[in-house]
């Protein structure tokens, strides 16, 4: 009897040991999967970010439509460590994709599901992938406060990743305007280091890679690099993918009685109805006035050698009462 009882106890203890070992194995596997998902601040991680300027034009019905010009791709890569106040951060460089030149850009570190970015003297939370549905947070750049987290999960290459859409706190409706979207282990779908809307333009994450292997490519983009001016294939491809128009040159408001001709260094403005032009102003794409002149004639010649390459708006006052707006590109 003692022998039988001993054997039962032995088997019972072994079952407990096996069960504990099994649980330890499963926990280890879950931790490994979680760690793979959350390796945001890791050596060799690379992000490519599309940027372009845009302005608003009018369609054939006079409705505003977005028009883009000159697309460009920036690349960020984590290379090496940097120590500040005894804390080790990963060093982020911006890489020139044509020359390979590296420029120090940021220092970040990851602790659990939070990613921190080092400012001049203190660090701030850059991402918090632990947010759950209904949580409220602020962006590190300080532009937006009290953002509401809408959380779901998406399958990326066989791995479920948390997706956090950030909307104003009172906008818990899924259809409310999204300020930013974070993808677990990938970051913002707008930019690598996202700080709110880009004035006069937009930014989109194209691809995120680990050890030269693409982990995420954002639809609808077909590649990880776009670059070119107004007439380039890349600019037209991006415009088609996003449903925008391409800014092609001088455009004027519909039914205008003012004619405008532009060359590399001059703008000729004339009233086709023999009305008197009383003033002209030029604004850059950020809305800053860069030129102003009072007139008292039916035509004027404006020298624009002082303007840098870019998109501008020409506002013309006629008879001190009507303002016509023209959009042009300084090449």
Image (spheres, rainbow, N blue to C red):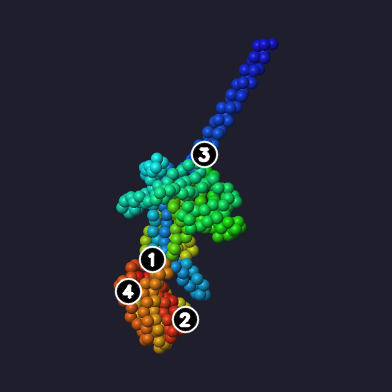
* Percent x, y of residue 134: 60, 51
| 302 lies above or below 184 | below
CA–CA distance between discs 3 and 4? 59 Å
**Tag 1 or tag 4, which sits nearer the N-term?**
1
CA–CA distance between discs 2 and 3? 62 Å
Residue situated furthest bottom in the rendering: 274
Question: Which residue is denoted by mark 3 in the rendering?
Answer: 33
CA–CA distance between discs 4 and 1? 20 Å
**Tag 3 or tag 2, which sits nearer the N-term?**
3
Question: Which residue is denoted by mark 2 in the rendering?
Answer: 255
* Cβ atoms at labels 3 and 4 below 8 Å apart: no
**Tag 4 or tag 2, which sits nearer the N-term?**
2
Question: Which residue is denoted by mark 1 in the rendering?
Answer: 230
Q: Residue at x 44, y 52 (%)?
A: 192
Quarter of the image where one finds residue 130:
top right
The mark tally for this picture is 4
Q: Residues within 10 Å of mark 2 (few under 14, many from 20)?
A: few
Image quadrant in which the N terminus is located: top right
Between residue 183 and residue 114, name the one nearer to us. Answer: 114
* Cβ atoms at labels 2 and 1 below 8 Å apart: no
**Tag 1 or tag 3, which sits nearer the N-term?**
3
* Percent x, y of residue 218: 48, 53
* Cβ atoms at labels 2 and 3 below 8 Å apart: no
Name the element at disc 1.
loop
Between residue 248 and residue 315, name the one nearer to us. Answer: 315
Between residue 154 and residue 193, name the one nearer to us. Answer: 193
Question: Which residue is denoted by mark 4 in the rendering?
Answer: 304
Q: Residue at x 36, y 74 (%)?
A: 291
Any mark on residue 43, and which?
A: none
**Tag 4 or tag 3, which sits nearer the N-term?**
3
**Tag 1 or tag 2, which sits nearer the N-term?**
1
| 12 lies above or below 116 | above
């Amino acid at each position: 009897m003692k022998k039988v009882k001993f054997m039962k106890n032995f088997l019972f203890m072994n079952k407990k040991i096996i069960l504990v070992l099994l649980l330890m194995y499963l926990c280890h596997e879950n931790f490994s999967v979680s760690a793979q998902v959350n390796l945001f601040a890791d050596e060799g991680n690379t992000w490519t970010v599309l940027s372009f300027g845009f302005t608003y034009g009018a369609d054939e019905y006079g409705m505003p439509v977005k028009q883009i010009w000159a697309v460009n791709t920036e690349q960020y890569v984590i290379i090496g460590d940097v120590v500040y106040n005894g804390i080790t951060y990963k060093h982020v460089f911006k890489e020139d994709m044509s020359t390979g030149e590296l420029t120090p850009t940021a220092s970040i570190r990851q602790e659990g599901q939070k990613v921190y970015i080092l400012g001049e003297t203190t660090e701030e939370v850059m991402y918090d992938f632990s947010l759950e549905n209904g949580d409220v947070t602020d962006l590190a750049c300080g532009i937006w406060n009290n953002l509401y987290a809408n959380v779901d999960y998406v399958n990326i290459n066989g791995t479920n990743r948390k997706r956090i859409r950030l909307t104003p706190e009172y906008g818990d409706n899924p259809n409310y305007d999204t300020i930013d979207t974070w993808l677990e282990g990938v970051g913002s779908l707008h930019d690598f280091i996202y700080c709110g809307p880009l004035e006069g333009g937009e930014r989109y994450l194209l691809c995120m890679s680990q050890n030269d292997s693409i982990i995420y490519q954002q639809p609808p983009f077909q590649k990880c690099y776009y670059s070119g001016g107004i007439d380039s294939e890349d600019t037209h491809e991006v415009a088609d993918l996003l449903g925008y128009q391409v800014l092609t040159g001088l455009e004027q408001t519909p039914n205008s009685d003012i004619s405008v001709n532009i060359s590399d260094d001059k703008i000729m403005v004339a009233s086709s109805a023999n009305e008197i032009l009383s003033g002209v102003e030029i604004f850059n794409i950020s809305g800053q006035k860069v030129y102003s002149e009072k007139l008292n004639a039916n035509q004027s010649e404006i020298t624009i050698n002082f303007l840098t390459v870019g998109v501008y708006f020409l506002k013309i006052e006629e008879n001190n009462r009507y303002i016509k707006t023209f959009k042009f590109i300084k090449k």
